[in-house]
Amino acid sequence: MSVSIILATVTLLFAGMAYPLAAAQSDELKLPLLLKTENESVNVMVDWNPKEIEPGNEVDISMDFQHPFAGTSLSHVNYNLRILDESGAEVESLTNLHTHIGQDVQTVTFDKTGNFKLMIEIIGTGINPPFDTTRSGTVEAAVMVVPEFPIVPAVMAAATALAVLAARFRFK
């Protein structure tokens, strides 16, 4: 069996193993997420753009604070948004936020790859304190920040480089 055939077989095997891993990363989380506070007083639809988060790039996190039974957006929601890394350290904290119409977008940047926890604490509703806390609670979501160079292209690039080297040595 020639070196080229062996390399082609290895390339296809690696690509076959890497593709499901990459697909699993993108398919694990279906956006938007429907999150419910622990006391079920508020539902929060959470989405982000871009869908695949890379370190160093801005991410728009959109939120729609909804009545849990009617599904309509709540007015005058006051909330905090926090992001924690895998060790539980706070990497982002936006406090005393307010949305008049129940929908809001906040822009954040993740500095590194890994798993993060997005926490949204709903303080209550109203324009001025003291806020109505009948609509309060916390929701959490897992956020994965992926490397800038995904695994499938890396495996394919390495396999191509090996095939080129093998072909070069074969013809000498």
Image: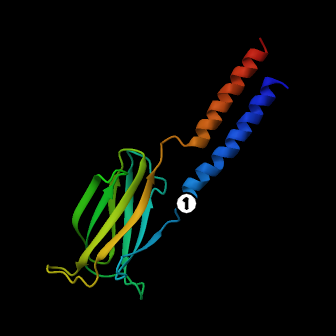
Q: Is residue 35 above or below residue 9?
A: below
Q: Which residue is mark 1?
A: 28
Furthest residue in direction bottom, as rendered: 70
Q: Is residue 161 above or below residue 46?
A: above
**Three-letter amino acid code of the residue under disc 1:** Glu
Q: Position of residue 29 (x, y in %)?
A: 52, 62
Q: Position of residue 31 (x, y in %)?
A: 50, 66
Give the tally of numbered discs: 1
Q: Specify the quadrant that holds the N terminus.
A: top right
Q: Position of residue 70 (x, y in %)?
A: 41, 88
- Say which quarter of the image contains residue 42: bottom left
SS class, disc 1:
loop
Q: Specify the quadrant that holds the C terminus.
A: top right
- What residue appears at the point 44 percent right and 47 percent down from the top-left corner? 54
- What residue appears at the point 71 percent right and 26 percent down from the top-left corner? 163
Task: Give the left or right position of residue 160, taking residue 52 as reference.
Answer: right
Classify mark 1: residues with Cα within 10 Å, few (<14), some (14-19) or many (20+): few
- What residue appears at the point 33 percent right and 64 percent down from the top-left corner? 119
Q: How is the image coloured?
A: rainbow
Task: Give the left or right position of residue 27, taking residue 136 as reference.
Answer: right
Q: Position of residue 52 (x, y in %)?
A: 49, 53
